[in-house]
Image (cartoon, rainbow, N blue to C red):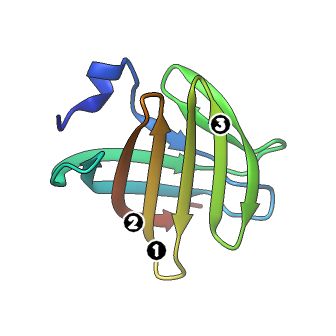
Amino acid sequence: MANWKMGLGAAVLCLMVGPAAAEMSCFFERECFDGDTCVPTTYEMEMRDGDPAQLVIEHAELDVEAAKDGTWLARGFGMSVLMSVGEDGNARASFHLPGPQVVVYLGRCEEGE
């Protein structure tokens, strides 16, 4: 089930970070659906400053509830999203959905201007 977004009615996600973080663009190349083998993907997120910081899904916005040391948590619309970015730019985003189901994205983030 490589394209879970269509099956669950979700869409491309964009993540916005807390007030102390710079804008970032994140590009994910691997999608891992709830225990299945990971598959190639072209999935993008955008991290931005804000008050409150927000996780913007193509059709909705989620407020970031917690942020610390390169990790952000946002919830809403029946899901929780945990995003982490290392100092080297490697990024992981996990989407915890009803069922329970988990989708993990593996990729990189780069600081914007």
Q: Which residue is mark 1?
A: 89
Q: Nearer the viewer, mark 2 or mark 3?
A: 3
| In-image side of 18 versus 76 (left or right) | right
Residue 75's tag is: 3
Q: Nearer the viewer, mark 3 or mark 1?
A: 3
Q: Which residue is mark 2?
A: 108
Q: Position of residue 30 (x, y in %)?
A: 24, 56
Disc 1: CA contacts within 10 A as few (<14), some (14-19) or many (>=20): some
- 108 up-or-down from 40: above or below: below
Question: Which is more toward the observer, 71 or 87?
Answer: 71
Residue at image x 46%, y 43%? 95
Answer with mark 3 or mark 1, whichever residue precedes in sequence: 3
Residue at image x 54%, y 81%? 87
Answer with mark 2 or mark 1, whichever residue precedes in sequence: 1
Q: Are marks 2 and 1 in contact (CB under 8 Å)?
A: yes
Location of the N terminus by quadrant is top left
Residue 26's tag is: none
SS at badge 1:
loop
- 52 up-or-down from 48: above or below: above
**Residue 103's image quarter?**
top left
Residue at image x 73%, y 59%? 67
Label 2 – label 1 distance at C-alpha: 5 Å
Label 2 – label 3 distance at C-alpha: 22 Å
